[in-house]
Image (cartoon, rainbow, N blue to C red):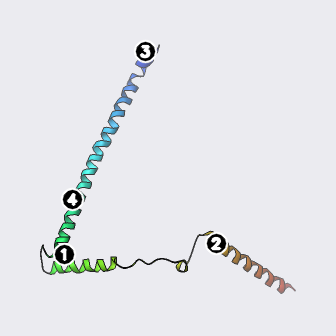
Amino acid sequence: GFLGVVQAIYPLLLLYAISFNAAPAWRNFRNQAENEKIAERNAARRQAAFALQAGLAGGIGSGEGNRKLKSKIRAARKLGSGEVKRIKSDDVAYSTSDEFAEKAAKAKQLSDIDDFDKRLQNRS
């Protein structure tokens, strides 16, 4: 009866129960390892940012390397602080809008009509 069926599929039920608990555990261990890597990268970024700020303030090091760093940062700020160019509709060379497609189709139709008229005149 029922107990016979349960005993027959017991290995499958056991495998299901183990995997039901093992999958989240595996995911947890994998996420912890990934989070540790992310934390290390973030710490390195914080340390680099601190060193950069200290170097700009003149707190750490001096000399040619520090001057090069400062000039590079000034150049980057100059590039970064520039106003972003806004693209206007006059600047667009190609558009996939329906209006453009309609204009192109109309131009082709007019071209075809002109071509037909020229052929008609040549026959006469």
> Tag 3's secondary structure?
helix
> Tag 4's secondary structure?
helix
Q: CA distance from mark 1 to mark 2?
A: 53 Å
Residue 32 place in picture, x, y as percent: 26, 46
**Which is more N-terminal, label 3 or label 2?**
3
Q: Which amino acid is tagged 2?
A: Glu
Residue 26 place in picture, x, y as percent: 31, 40
Name the residue beneath numbered marker 2: 99
**Which is more N-terminal, label 1 or label 4?**
4
> Is the residue 11 above or below the residue 118 in the image?
above
> Is the residue 106 above or below the residue 32 in the image?
below
Which of the two discs, 3 and 4, sits closer to the camera? 4
Q: Which amino acid is tagged 4?
A: Ala
Q: CA distance from mark 4 to mark 2?
A: 52 Å
- Contact, mark 4 vs mark 1 (Cβ under 8 Å): no
Disc assigned to residue 43 = 4
- Contact, mark 2 vs mark 3 (Cβ under 8 Å): no
**Which is more N-terminal, label 4 or label 3?**
3
**Which is more N-terminal, label 3 or label 1?**
3
Q: Which amino acid is tagged 3?
A: Leu
- Which quadrant would residue 97 be assigned to in this image? bottom right
> Is the residue 118 above or below the residue 106 in the image?
below
Residue 121 place in picture, x, y as percent: 83, 86
Name the residue beneath numbered marker 3: 3
Question: Foreground: 10 or 109?
Answer: 109
Q: Residues within 10 Å of mark 3 (few under 14, many from 20)?
A: few
